Image (cartoon, rainbow, N blue to C red):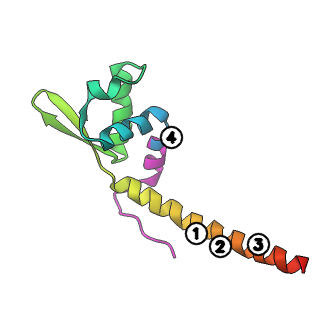
Amino acid sequence: MVEQLPDDLDLDAVFQALAHPIRRAILEQVADGPENVSELAEPHDVSLAAVSKHLHVLEDAGLIDNRKDGRVRRCHLNAAPLSAAFGWLTRYRVFWEDRFDALAIHLVEDKE
């Protein structure tokens, strides 16, 4: 029951991007709508250069897209990689739930 992932999706890159709290916060910001780099940097106590590096990691993972709007670069959420990561995690949630159910049945039977 191994589900194939899209060829261009790198789950390692997605999970690496999600591993940092600033990058997760940026994703939450762009989930509410497109924002420019200055808007994304505002709530964080880091330089614009640091935010730019975080944005590159998110872009490389396919989690955000950039679009030029005049002189301003706006970042948009691309939720497809998140959906694929959720699907991968869900398979293992089901796997462990089945194992715990079997263990619970075994323990009840063993008690009797």
Label of residue 27 in the image? none
- Say what secondary structure mark 3 lies in: helix
The residue pinned by badge 1 equals 94
Residue 3, given in percent of the width and then of the height, sits at: 45, 71
Q: What residue occupies the far left of the structure in this picture?
A: 70
Measured in 3D between alpha carbons, the distance from the residue under mark 2 to the one under mark 4, in whole angstroms, is 28 Å
Q: Which one is closest to the eye, mark 1 or mark 4?
A: 1
Span highlighted in magenta in the image? 1-17
User: Sequence-wise, which precedes: disc 1 or disc 4?
Assistant: 4
User: Sequence-wise, which precedes: disc 3 or disc 4?
Assistant: 4
Residue 99, given in percent of the width and then of the height, sits at: 69, 71
The residue pinned by badge 4 equals 19
Residue at the image point whose x is 37% and y is 46% from the top: 61
The residue pinned by badge 3 equals 103
User: Sequence-wise, which precedes: disc 2 or disc 4?
Assistant: 4
Label of residue 98 in the image? 2
- Say what secondary structure mark 1 lies in: helix
- Classed neighbour count for the residue bearing mark 2: other residues with Cα under 10 Å, few (<14), some (14–19), many (≥20): few
Labels 1 & 2 near each other (Cβ < 8 A): yes
Type of amino acid under label 3: Leu
Q: Is residue 99 left or right of residue 91?
A: right
Type of amino acid under label 2: Asp
Measured in 3D between alpha carbons, the distance from the residue under mark 2 to the one under mark 3, in whole angstroms, is 9 Å
Q: Quadrant of residue 8?
A: bottom left
Q: Depth check: 27 or 58 in front?
A: 27
Labels 3 & 4 near each other (Cβ < 8 A): no
Type of amino acid under label 1: Val
